[in-house]
Every structure is written in structure tokens, then in C-alpha cells.
Image (cartoon, rainbow, N blue to C red):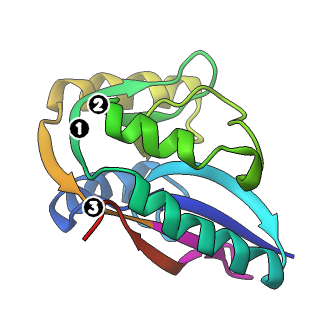
């Protein structure tokens, strides 16, 4: 069994901004580029993932490209000490998320969907407070068009790599 996940990668410009924080505050910095998680990690066999990939082609065709707008720095505290760039919940992004959580694709999402790009995690309470205070002041204001999503798989060293990329929208 291999571990898979589904994500959207923003442009290099937004990744560079996120990474400027992540290299200091995110221990997963070297494992995966900045991203919006569309489907949390799940396990599948080689056989199962081929069927899932076919289904993802359909999902891509049936959903619409969306505008990714990162507009503020926020936090999941007190649930956990994760700091992130909040991403606008557009109807298109929500539709894509919902389409990835059907019975055929493993059922409904475990948590309610909060579109975001993690920039800091696994911080102590004091670190979280300091870092969140300064990052919130720095803020973020970025907009771009997203027209693809990615099926990723986890390597033995814990890092994630693209298994297949899917276009969003009809050609």
C-alpha cells in the first residue's frame, strides 16, 4: 500500500513567499512544496490508484478553474499551532473539494474544508504566539488562476512527489 494525497500547488511566486516562512517554521518544508490540500493522505494499491486516477480525470473535466486568492495570515489555534495563508473559499474550489470526497473516492471529508497554505506548524505555544503576531502584521495579498490539481504519493523518506497532474475544466 502506498500513501496518496491530492493537492493544488500555487505559482512559484506564492510558493517562494510561503517558503520564506516555511524554511524557518515548518518542519515539513523539505517534504512537500507549499500547497492546498484537497484530500488528506489515503492508502491505495497500484490497482486501486489506477481506478482513482481515471476518476480524477472526470473530476477535472467536471469542475471549473478557480481564482486562488490568499488574503490573510490565520491560525488553527487553539485546535493546533498551525499558521497558514487563508485562501478564499470560492464556489469552484469548494465544488472541486466536494467532487474529491464522493463514495467512489473514499467518502466524505474527515474535517470541514478550510482552504489554506500552511506556513508554520509544530510550534510551541510561545513560538506560535510570537510568529503569528509578526506574520499577521506582514500579511498576504495574492491572486492567481488555478487550472490543475495533482495526485501525489509519499516516498519512503516521507517526502511527497507528483504521481499525476489533472487539468481542471474542459479543453
- Please state the horizontal and vertical placement of residue 83, each as a whole percent of the image: 43, 33
Outermost top residue: 78
CB-based contact (under 8 Å), mark 2 and mark 3: no
Mark 3 secondary-structure assignment = loop
Asked if disc 1 and disc 3 are in contact, CB closer than 8 Å, the reply is: no
Residue 59 in percent (x, y) is at 50, 58
Q: In which quarter of the image is the N terminus?
A: bottom right
Numbered disc in front, either 2 or 1? 2
Closer mark to the observer between disc 2 and disc 3: 3
Out of 147 and 159, give the one closest to the viewer: 147
Q: Residue at x 55, y 60 (%)?
A: 6
Residue placed under numbered mark 2 in the picture: 88
Quadrant location of the C terminus in the rendered image: bottom left
Whether 25 is drawn above or below 53: the answer is: above
Q: How crowded is mark 1: few (under 14 residues within 10 Å), some or many (20 or more)?
A: many
Residue occupying image coordinates x 38% and y 54%: 22
Q: Which mark is residue 52?
A: none
Q: Does the magenta-highlighted stretch encompass residue 158? A: yes
- Chain-order first, disc 1 or disc 3: 1
Mark 1, residue position: 70
Q: Earlier in the sequence, mark 2 or mark 1?
A: 1
Magenta part of the protein: which range? 150-162
CA separation in Å, label 2 and label 1: 6 Å
Query: N-terminal of the two: label 2 or label 3?
Result: 2
Amino acid at each position: 500500500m502506498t500513501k496518496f494525497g491530492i493537492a493544488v500547488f500555487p505559482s512559484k511566486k506564492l510558493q517562494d513567499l510561503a517558503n520564506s516562512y516555511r524554511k524557518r517554521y515548518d518542519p515539513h518544508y523539505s517534504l512537500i512544496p507549499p500547497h492546498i490540500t484537497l484530500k488528506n493522505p489515503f492508502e491505495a494499491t497500484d490497482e486501486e490508484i489506477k481506478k482513482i486516477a481515471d476518476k480524477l480525470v472526470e473530476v477535472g473535466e467536471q469542475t471549473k478553474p478557480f481564482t486562488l486568492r490568499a488574503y490573510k495570515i490565520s491560525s488553527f489555534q487553539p485546535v493546533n499551532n498551525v499558521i497558514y495563508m487563508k485562501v478564499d473559499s470560492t464556489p469552484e474550489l469548494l465544488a472541486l473539494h466536494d467532487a474529491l470526497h464522493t463514495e467512489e473516492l473514499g467518502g466524505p471529508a474527515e474535517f470541514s474544508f478550510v482552504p489554506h497554505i500552511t506556513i508554520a506548524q509544530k510550534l510551541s505555544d510561545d513560538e506560535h504566539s510570537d510568529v503569528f503576531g509578526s506574520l499577521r502584521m506582514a500579511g498576504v495579498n495574492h491572486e492567481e488562476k488555478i487550472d490543475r490539481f495533482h495526485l501525489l504519493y509519499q516516498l519512503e523518506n516521507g517526502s511527497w512527489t507528483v504521481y499525476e497532474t489533472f487539468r481542471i475544466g474542459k479543453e
